[in-house]
Amino acid sequence: MNRCIVCSSQSGSLIEQYIYSSVCSRCHENYGICQTSCGCCSICSRALTLDLIHRIATARRAAQTWNQVVVLKGAHTVVAFPDGGAVLSPFANPGLATAGTGDVLAGVIAGLVSQGLSLADAAALGVFLHGSAGERVRSELGDTGMVASDLLPALPRAINALRAG
């Protein structure tokens, strides 16, 4: 059974620190941390300011060290896997750097896991759908003024577009 632990972007909470220390220190294969920008890891927190090559290397190192699927959200979000592989989002949308959009991403990934996708597939697909929805909102609203709730009606359209090929 897959279990998915999602850290929100509010890194200071004791709950997140407890989850990180009690679960990540054991690194079971059936757990995944789906959003490393939560700040519960100083490695990934530092990576937010690094260039893309270093962000990829950081995410890969964290995924291998923790034996987890790691999503490092940012321009060209990185999804890294325990086997050392990684995929990169084709999207770099500044509108997705607003409060709550990481929570939307985490919800998309969790929803895909609940539908039976593996953590790795759910993370990669979730990142793509999140970015695609963001691009749809950007085309309607522009680069500024996007809020997380704007993504919600765009997600089904992104899913349908992907299905249609």
Image (spheres, helix red, strand yellow):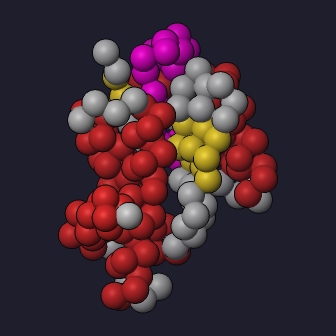
Image: 71 above or below 149: above
Residue 41 in view (yes/no): no
- So how many labels did they put on this image? 0
The quadrant holding residue 104 is bottom left
Q: Position of residue 36 (x, y in %)?
A: 53, 41
**Residue 145 appears anywhere in the view:** yes
For the magenta stretch, what is the residue range?
22-37
Which residue is nearer to you in this view: 105 or 1?
1
Task: Look at 26% across and 64% down and name the residue there.
Answer: 160
Q: Residue at x 41, y 82 (%)?
A: 138
Residue 120 lies left or right of residue 110; in this view the side is right
How far from the left and from the top, in percent, is residue 56? Answer: 71, 47
Q: Residue furthest front?
A: 165
Image coordinates for residue 64, horizontal then vertical, percent: 67, 25
Taking the magenta stretch, the answer to whether it contains residue 89 is no
Residue drawn at (37%, 77%), measured in percent from left and top? 136
Magenta region includes residue 27: yes
Residue 103, relative to residue 14: is it above or below?
Answer: below
Residue 134 in the figure: left or right of residue 73: left
At a point 26% along the width and 69% down the height, the residue shown is 157
Q: Position of residue 106 (x, y in %)?
A: 36, 46
Q: Quadrant of residue 50?
A: bottom right
- 2 left or right, relative to 22: left
Position of the C terminus by quadrant: bottom left
Q: Nearer the viewer, residue 165 or 119?
A: 165
Foreground: 106 or 128?
A: 128
